[in-house]
Image (spheres, rainbow, N blue to C red):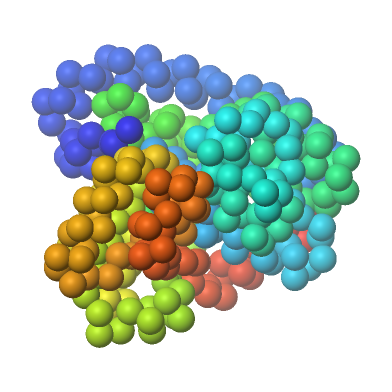
Amino acid sequence: MRAPGFWWREPGAAAALLSPAARVYGVIAERRLKKRGERVGVPVVCIGDPTVGGAGKTPTAIAVMRLLIEARRRPMFLTRGFGGTLRGPVMVEASHTAAQVGDEPLLLARVAPTIVARDRVAGARFAAEKGAGFIVMDDGFQNPSLVKDLSVLVVDGARGIGNGRVIPAGPLRAPFHAQLNRAQLLLVLGKVTGASPIILAAQQREFPLVRATLEPDRKAVDLLRGKRVLAFAGIGHPAKFFATLAAAGIETPSCRAFPDHHRYRASEAAALITAATSGGLQLVTTEKDFVRLKDDPALAQLAAQSLAVPISLGRSDEFDRLMRGALASR
């Protein structure tokens, strides 16, 4: 699904029309957030997004995981495995495909042991049985079934929370104030334009807030120096990936956006290859897209001709300091 364009603009007629449904959804979502969850005897860190997709949760979760690994806390990832067929709990193995466990778990498993589970409590218990000293959730902030000891809300600096309305009138998964009340840190990624009201609100409440950036892998960027590329992405916010490439000095005369977790068809793959060939362009995509391409033999040619550009959270001493302190207290 693609988020409607009006979600990210000032509230207009469409948002007003859907406001009654949004109020009902918001009340239900806020009540759900207040439900008491279960503990499994292992501290849980949750990286969440107050809106629907694309803020930068996965790079943030990986950055937190690296801090825990550095501190020798025996951390493990826990994720729902969106787009996969396995319900879990299951430990992600090298033999798994994106079709089985989803694309994000395959990336997380490169960094640390990763468990996929639709049932978050069952997944956390499974992690505890496997010897986890810490659990890092790459999703599930709005799911109250498991108690989170530390929650970080990630917001895109350019889009912020869009028109500030709750689904279906806007992109918020629940009223923003209700989500902020359940978090301990707000991380704003990238150049701040649409997130200015959020930063002001956090400052007025003296709520802990950190700013950071997403950065492309330097080796991948060097490989693309002097080349013109056709960038394609099926993630929560493709434009964010395209902007990151452009900011790194990569010439992107052609960009193709697809829905989040998109399963490419053979015809789409052929069209991308044809467009790149005719325009003399290098195909470039995200790591999440690339792991999905490798699943399907029909997409093998597209995978072979595409370069994946890893994106990570830029080094932030303030973020590291605050996270180390918060994690140590847990």
Q: Quick check: 204 left or right of 107?
A: left
Q: Is residue 57 above or below residue 8?
A: below
Q: Quadrant of residue 199?
A: bottom left
The image shows residue 25 at horizontal and vertical percentages of: 39, 18
Residue name at image x 66 percent, y 61 percent: 111
Task: Give the percent coordinates (x, y) of residue 313.
Answer: 50, 66
Is residue 265 toward the left or the right of residue 102 in the image? left
Let me know if residue 231 appears in the view: yes
Return the x and y of residue 129 as percentages of the image width and height: 88, 40
Can you tell which quarter of the image residue 101 is in? top right
The residue nearer to you, when weighing 270 against 237, is: 270
Depth check, front residue: 304 or 217: 304
Residue 286 vs residue 114: left or right?
Answer: left
Q: Residue at x 46, y 48 (%)?
A: 297
Position of residue 250 relative to residue 147, above or below, is: below
Residue 46 visible to the viewer: no
Residue 193: where, in percent of width, then height?
25, 59
Residue drawn at (76%, 29%) of the image: 122
Residue closest to the far left: 13
Indicate whether 261 appears above or below 60.
Answer: above
Q: Give the quadrant of the N terminus.
A: top left
Q: Residue at image x 28%, y 70%? A: 282
In the picture, measured across the screen, residue 143 lies left or right of residue 161, that is right
Q: Tag count in the figure?
A: 0
